[in-house]
Amino acid sequence: MKKIKITALFLSLLLSLSCEEIGIIEEDLPFVSLYEVDGQISPGEKTPTINFTKSIPINESFDIKKVALDNVNAYIWSDTQGIIPLIHIGNGSYQPLKSKSQKLQIKANAVYELYADINGTRVYAKTKVPSPPEVIDVKIIQNYIECEISGKEGEVYSCIYIVQDGFQLGNPRIVKREKNFFSVEGDGKAGIVKLRTGDIPPEYLNTGSDLKVGVEVYAWDKAYKDYFKTKDNNKPIDDIFSQGGGLVNWNVYGENTIGLFMGYAIKVIMDF
């Protein structure tokens, strides 16, 4: 009994010392501000928006004026449209410069590169913009939608369910959209790809309802799958004794820079 009491006391002391050490480590860790780049581009876009911001300590209240970068020199390049400069339109957002001689229109199956200089830090990203996915089959299985895609080289795929108001003819209103992708499928090679949505709430599956269930199918640059698989790695760790998830696979490169510059295309299917 005495030995058990001594062991318990030792463990309590060890845990209290460990917590103190963790607190010291957390207090001593220096904050490193990261540059953040965010831009998704799809076929037909004439004024895609690229956002340049920086991170702030978690104990600071968010203010767009604190994080927005307004002095970035950036441009988009493609082998068919050349160099298209980006200009700041406010709050860290940049869009292509409009001129009579140079106009950008994002094209399907084309490759685009992003170049930027942020306070002396060189930033680079490259992406392929897919065409809308070629959907072979769509069906409801129990309480989710399954899609079959004719996959193309360099692309991956995902889908979400949507629910439209059947009364809004010609301009239907979306009353429900799935918030997150169930998965991202494909290996970047040509071939048949199967994917599914998450579970559809039962109230939307009633055949007597005036609501209509459909699906948005996305084609992505293949780099999106690596990001999707690792995107939750930067979530805070609730249990201090658990292991961190690792790094997020971004496709923007630069010292102390993270982000996505990603091509995508959507096909909406309501009748199946």
Image (cartoon, helix red, strand yellow):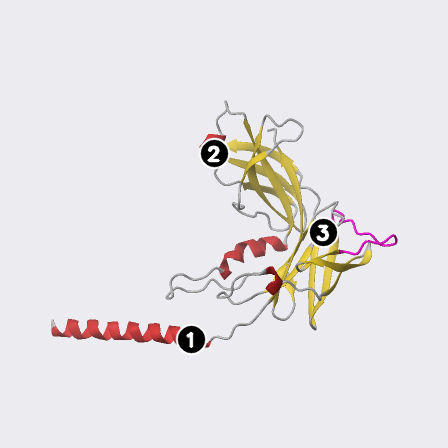
Location of residue 268 in the rendering, given as x and y in whole percent from the top left corner: 64, 36
The amino acid marked with disc number 1 is Ile
What residue is rendered at 74% in x and 48% in y?
Answer: 109
Q: Is residue 62 left or right of residue 132?
A: left
Identify the element where label 1 is drawn: helix
Say which of marks 2 and 3 sits in front: 3
Mark 2 or mark 1: whose residue is earlier in sequence = 1
- Relative to 163, say whether 72 is above or below: below
Q: Which residues are magenta?
A: 96-109
Asked whether, in this view, residue 16 is left or right of residue 267, the answer is left
Which residue was labeled with disc 1? 25
Tell whether label 3 touches label 2 (CB within 8 Å).
no
Q: Which residue is mark 2?
A: 143
* Residue contact at pointers 1 and 3, CB within 8 angstroms: no
Between the residue at mark 2 and the residue at mark 1, the CA separation in whole angstroms equals 48 Å
Q: Residue at x 58, y 53 (%)?
A: 225
Magenta stretch encompasses residue 222: no
